[in-house]
Image (cartoon, rainbow, N blue to C red):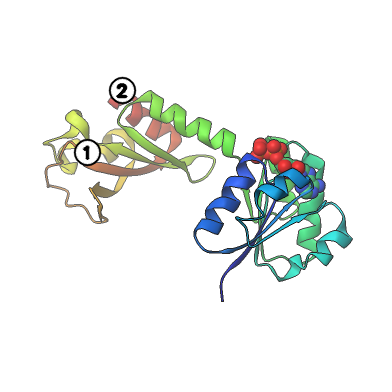
Amino acid sequence: MKREFAVIGLGRFGGSICMELSREGFNVLAIDMEEDKVNEFRNIASHAVIADTTDEQVLKELGIRNIEHVIVAIGENIQASILTTIMLKELGIKKITVKAQNDYHEKVLNKIGADHVVHPERDMGKRLAHKIISNNILDYLELSDEHSIVEVQAGKKMAGRSLIALDIRAAYGCNVVAIKQGNEINVSPSPDAELGADDILIVIGADRDIGRFERSLA
Ligand code: ADP
């Protein structure tokens, strides 16, 4: 059986989730209270409906109960986002992902039991900041409030040296967990192999330590 998703709120964020899931061949129920938005997705999603999801009866009538993963992408209207999330929770939806507008919104969403809270503007801002710090930082992924993973291009500074010689763990307290070479990912990199300038190191550590490592590359 095909996996079923519902996306509530078809703004820029919800709209692109809906578009991508549909393109990947999943069944998507696209919901928005505005007719224009819904019309945009009539030929993209498997179903597109005009509905205000803060009305419990409306949610029930949509049969949302049968959907395993619901994404709440209501932007500006924080109250509507919270109310919708609470009702989805009460209806027993297995997986609820919600877009948070700010830190307080995020706190409330976690309290009421959203399974996954995303904060796209803040996260994208952080990732971009790390890429700006150094041209070698290719990507940045937050693991917790204090820990992250970064993808770092070896570049000239590390090329020709081995992991033993670089001794990143001793110098910065971070660990190299894998090395990417083209499409290949080596999850147990040899400590004494010389790195190439195009090799990409996947480094895990505390933000403070990763920050020191990043600055050493700047
Ligand atoms: P983005 O920043 O991702 O573009 P927007 O705030 O522009 O987010 O879009 C959120 C969408 O959510 C809008 O299209 C809006 O009509 C829809 N929306 C807001 N409240 C509700 C609600 N109660 N029920 C259904 N859709 C809603």
Residue 117 at x, y = what percent?
Answer: 63, 48
Residue 99 at x, y = what percent?
Answer: 65, 44
Q: Is residue 118 visible?
A: no
Mark-to-mark CA distance, 2 and 1? 18 Å
Quadrant containing the C terminus in the rendered view: top left
Q: Neighbour class for label 2 at 10 Å: few (<14), some, many (≥20)?
A: few
Judged from the image, the secondary structure of the residue bearing numbered disc 1 is loop
Q: Nearer the viewer's eye, disc 2 or disc 1?
A: 2
Q: Is residue 21 visible?
A: yes
User: Residue at 65% of width from left, 51% of height from top?
Assistant: 41
User: Residue at 61% of width from left, 40% of height from top?
Assistant: 119
* Three-letter code for the amino acid on which mark 2 is drawn: Ala
| Foreground residue among 133 and 208 | 133
Q: In the rendered image of this protein, does residue 90 appear above or below residue 167?
A: below
Q: In the rendered image of this protein, does residue 134 appear above or below residue 89?
A: above
Residue 105 at x, y = what percent?
Answer: 73, 40
Q: Which residue is mark 2?
A: 218
Q: Is residue 135 left or right of residue 42?
A: left
Q: Which residue is mark 1?
A: 167
Q: Taking the image as four quarters, which one is ligand 1 found in? A: top right
Q: Quadrant of residue 156?
A: top left
Judged from the image, the secondary structure of the residue bearing numbered disc 2 is loop
User: Residue at 62% of width from left, 40% of height from top?
Assistant: 12
Q: Neighbour class for label 1 at 10 Å: few (<14), some, many (≥20)?
A: some
Do residues under tags 2 and 1 come within 8 Å of each other at their CB atoms?
Answer: no
Q: Which mark is residue 210?
A: none
Q: Quadrant of residue 78?
A: top right
* Three-letter code for the amino acid on which mark 1 is drawn: Asp
- For marks 2 and 1, the one nearer the N-term is 1
Q: In the rendered image of this protein, does residue 63 appear above or below residue 51?
A: below
Residue 191 at x, y = what percent?
Answer: 17, 48
User: Residue at 34% of width from left, 26% of height from top?
Assistant: 134
